[in-house]
Image: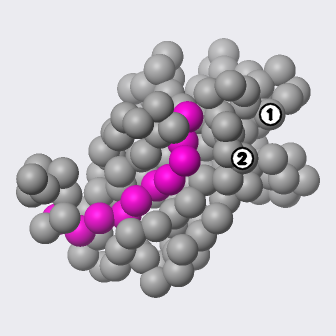
Amino acid sequence: MNDVILITGAVAFQINLDPTVWIFDDRKTEMSTWFPGVEGWGMRLGPFLENAQPDPKATHVICHQSTGEKVTISMDQARSAILRFSRDGKPIRPDGPALLYLADGSNVDQPIGYLTRLEVVCAEESPAHRE
């Protein structure tokens, strides 16, 4: 498992996220703040996306997983998403380095794990338009 998650695609700057160091970040928040009953620490994805400066036409983020699967979410969902980076006081293993939770809680029981890359795409590049 890689400890780094890349933000790539339609961005001005590729960002490398290393959730293993977030325990020292003052922006971390207890997961139960967002999702009662969920233990551990989390960080908002939005500030990291904004630092990458996504193309204004960006509409989606493709979550690439080490399992080879891909999950597509909207830019709005990505901007408000939470990345959980600890479980039981330890880094997320083996499904980490972070788990992506949608802010509306719709995937609280099945967060997106095994993340390796978050690819920002514009409408013309979205999976519905790929062949």
Residue beneath the point at 56% across and 60% down = 6
| In this rendering, position of residue 102 left or right of residue 37 | left
Secondary element at tag 1? strand
C-beta proximity under 8 Å, tags 2 and 1? yes
Q: In the rendered structure, which amino acid carries the disc numbered 1?
A: Pro
| In this rendering, position of residue 82 left or right of residue 129 | right
Q: In the rendered structure, which amino acid carries the disc numbered 2?
A: Asp
**Residue 119 painted magenta:** yes
| In this rendering, position of residue 47 left or right of residue 92 | left
Residue beneath the point at 73% across and 55% down = 18
Say few, some or many: other residues with alpha carbon within 10 Å of mark 1 (under 14 / 14 to 19 / 20 or more): many
Along the line of sight, which residue is nearer the eye, 82 or 33?
82
For marks 2 and 1, give the CA distance.
Answer: 9 Å
Give the residues in magenta. 114-123
Which quadrant, please, contains the N terminus?
Answer: top right
Q: Which residue is mark 2?
A: 3
Q: Which residue is mark 1?
A: 91
The label on residue 129 is: none
Secondary structure predominantly adopted by residues drawn in magenta? strand
